[in-house]
Image: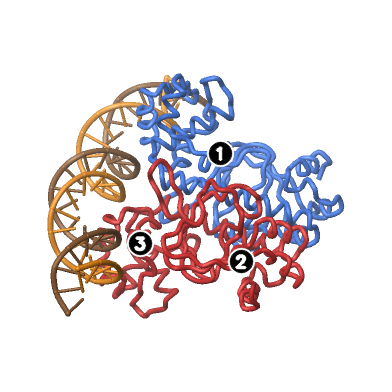
Chain colours: A red, B blue, C orange, D brown
Amino acid sequence: MRDSEVEIVRSLPLFSSMAEENLGSMLAGSFLQRFPATVVLFAESDLTDFLHVLVEGQVELYASVNNREGTMTLIKPVATFVLASALVDGAYQMSARTLETSQILMIPAENVRKAMRDDSEFAQKAVMELAACYHGVVRAYKNIKLRTAVERLANYLLVQHRRQSGEGEITLPVEKRTLASMLGMTPENLSRAFSTLKPYGVTVDGADIRLEKLNDLETLAKPSEFIDAR
Amino acid sequence: MRDSEVEIVRSLPLFSSMAEENLGSMLAGSFLQRFPATVVLFAESDLTDFLHVLVEGQVELYASVNNREGTMTLIKPVATFVLASALVDGAYQMSARTLETSQILMIPAENVRKAMRDDSEFAQKAVMELAACYHGVVRAYKNIKLRTAVERLANYLLVQHRRQSGEGEITLPVEKRTLASMLGMTPENLSRAFSTLKPYGVTVDGADIRLEKLNDLETLAKPSEFIDAR
DNA sequence: CGACGATTTGAATAGGATCAATGGGAGTGG
DNA sequence: CCACTCCCATTGATCCTATTCAAATCGTCG
């Protein structure tokens, strides 16, 4: 591994306060791999070989039941994923695929578990990271359980607007069908949800969305600090 | 705190390998409290003062949006809850109420955070516990996102049957309206879901349920190792 | 016994999914 | 460069699932 790659890892809060030697030995046997789009990285039933660090590109975590499939979450660089699975030494619990060409640093799960045992600083950070992941899923769970499809879309748009700070204009970071799946609806229904939001100042042009009545949209969406990410 | 109470705490995997002195200092300032049924213990926006250990009774964790409300999970003795919130020193993220008269051991969250810093064994266990909690919510999320109401009920019945090992007979451990909320539907819809399951050998008599065609029910439910708890 | 809440049932409605057909881009190969 | 193909997105029609509103029944507890 190159120094620049080590730096990327080091820049993540999870690894920031790890002792140098422990970081080194954890990264031994790790490798950076490049994947094209649409590649399945692992299935939910696979044993967790690696903690993944998405360095570039985009990854979708999804789950399947029968022949239904749903997006659990989207990963953007730079971030780790499947930390919980890597730490408990079991199945991944979710499947993953690339949405774009991606670079992923793969750290052997066994190394991560060893690091947790040997480096108490890292264990602390792992606790914090896991707690944040946990609250993230709790938010997603509340979102789908307590809101309608239109409300979920409206809140999604508001969150994106805050993140992109685009002054009334945002660009969807994923294909609409992926967005639909993440929001727990069909692509058809997402189209209709956008139509429903037209009276609230939402206009759509491909992936470019204009939000011209933010106040009205907020009135509809009723965003909540305990569901919507900052 | 009495020795018997310390023993209860010690019996939980989370605290099992904690050094004696650390356990002692963590429990300093803790107290066992008795609550009647239907008492709100905290709201999702409250700052997390205590890690809770349910010693006896039953507790519901729930969330509210607008004036909609939904059960997130049910806690049964002996178990801790809101560990993640206690560790990160923020809001609870979920509200809690007792469903029955309950005894709850309340451990100051600050003590828990200190224990995590001081006791590396405890930090390890916290990681494992959090990872398990995380996977628990992921399961719940998949369940509600990928299954219909009838499927969720069918799988719930099968899980209860396995747990109660009642040879074709189970008893619902909660009121039907609470079960409905946990399964993400209205009480009316739960009634109808039970009716729908009649052809699959499910007969209802109050809280007593008989499952007379387990194979048919499984065919309908299509249980999944990665959604349904063991 | 009477009151209250839980549960059930019925009817109407709403929210979403499915099926089908059409339009639109992006990429491919001629 | 253009025609072709493929997949995404949209729209319409219909169906199904689940919620809402209303009313009746059942149980429990004071």
Residue drawn at (43%, 43%) of the image: A65
Quarter of the rendering containing residue A215: bottom left
Distance from the alpha carbon under mark 2 to that under mark 3: 38 Å
Tell me whether circle 1 and circle 2 mark residues in contact (CB < 8 Å): no
Q: Residue at x 50, y 61 (%)?
A: A226
| Image position, residue B118 (x, y; %) | 80, 61
Mark 2 chain: A
In the image, residue A95 lies at what x, y percent? 49, 52
Query: Which of the image's four quarters has the C terminus of chain B?
Result: top right
Which residue type carries mark 1? Ala
Residue B229: % across, % down: 56, 39
Q: How many marks?
A: 3
Residue annotated with mark 1: B229
Q: Is residue A201 visible?
A: no
Which subunit holds the residue at mark 1? Answer: B
| Quadrant in which the N terminus of chain B appears | top right
Q: CA distance from mark 1 to mark 2?
A: 34 Å
B20 displayed left or right of A210: right
Task: From the image, state whether disc 2 or disc 3 is nearer to you.
Answer: 2
Q: Which residue is mark 3?
A: A153
Write down the residue under mark 2. Answer: A31
Marks 3 and 1 close (CB-CB < 8 Å): no
> Is A22 or A148 nearer to us in this picture?
A22
Identify the amino acid type marked 3: Leu
Q: Earlier in the sequence, mark 2 or mark 3?
A: 2
